[in-house]
Image (tube, coloured by chain):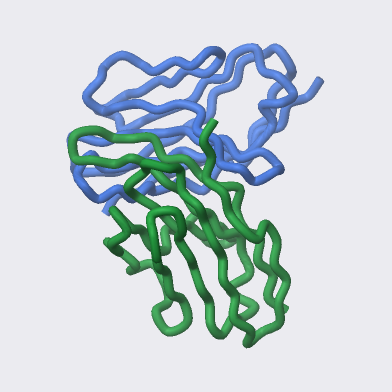
Amino acid sequence: DARVTQTPRHKVTEMGQEVTMRCQPILGHNTVFWYRQTMMQGLELLAYFRNRAPLDDSGMPKDRFSAEMPDATLATLKIQPSEPRDSAVYFCASGLISTASGGRVNFGPGTRLTVL
Amino acid sequence: AQTVTQSQPEMSVQEAETVTLSCTYDTSESDYYLFWYKQPPSRQMILVIRQEAYKQQNATENRFSVNFQKAAKSFSLKISDSQLGDAAMYFCAYRSAKNTDKLIFGTGTRLQVFP
């Protein structure tokens, strides 16, 4: 069974530090999403890519967050500098999406980030 | 903008019984997809069931089935013969069939299963 993988699974850091989260989407999937889950806001879409090109990052605080796909097997989400309010679980998801079909979206296990 | 509402923050069911989780959504589109995701304590998001809006037949996956009422914009999940392993957060989600790809989630329903 192909799976989306994320590293690290857990990260504890101090305020002001840079945090990099990595995701390996399922081979062949053309769309990669980054979601954030908090108790207060629930699941929020931060950004997503199609064929490695960023399509929408309107959900992401631009001043400190950045998302990239350096190649088809790697997506990264960086926070610099991190703040306590960034503490959340960050999910990467991938899917084979086209205008012709819905496509299933597979989620990774998430990265639990704690910023002290 | 589309919204998804889950009005039951918590539900409970006895093992082997049936439980229904509610979900309503708001959209002006006619073509879209609806999903139920399960999130156990491990936090993994697991797709339970998927429904295309253009299909009148309700989707079924083993013990899980949906009651899709397009006119009422309602999409409830029925779990039959509940098992202890069904205990989890359940999220209803909407996705437009247009090329926007965003999954819009409800706030979730926590399901407890009692032996």
The answer, for residue B65, to whether it is visible in the render is yes
Residue at point 71% right, 82% down? A14
Provide the letter of the chain coloured green: A
Viewer-nearest residue: B9 or A33: A33
Residue at point 32% right, 59% down? A52
Above/below status of B66 relative to A82: above
Asked where in the image residue B12 lies, by quadrant, the reply is top right
Which quadrant, please, contains the C terminus of chain A?
Answer: bottom right
Q: x and y percent of residue A79 in the render?
A: 53, 77
Q: x and y percent of residue A112 in the render?
A: 66, 60
Left or right: A66 in relation to B30: right
Viewer-nearest residue: A96 or B49: A96
User: Total of numbered circles in the picture?
Assistant: 0
Above/below status of B104 relative to B115: below
Residue at point 29% right, 35% down? A102
Which quadrant, please, contains the N terminus of chain A?
Answer: top right
Q: x and y percent of residue A8 in the render?
A: 65, 61
The answer, for residue A39, to whether it is visible in the render is no
Provide the letter of the chain coloured blue: B
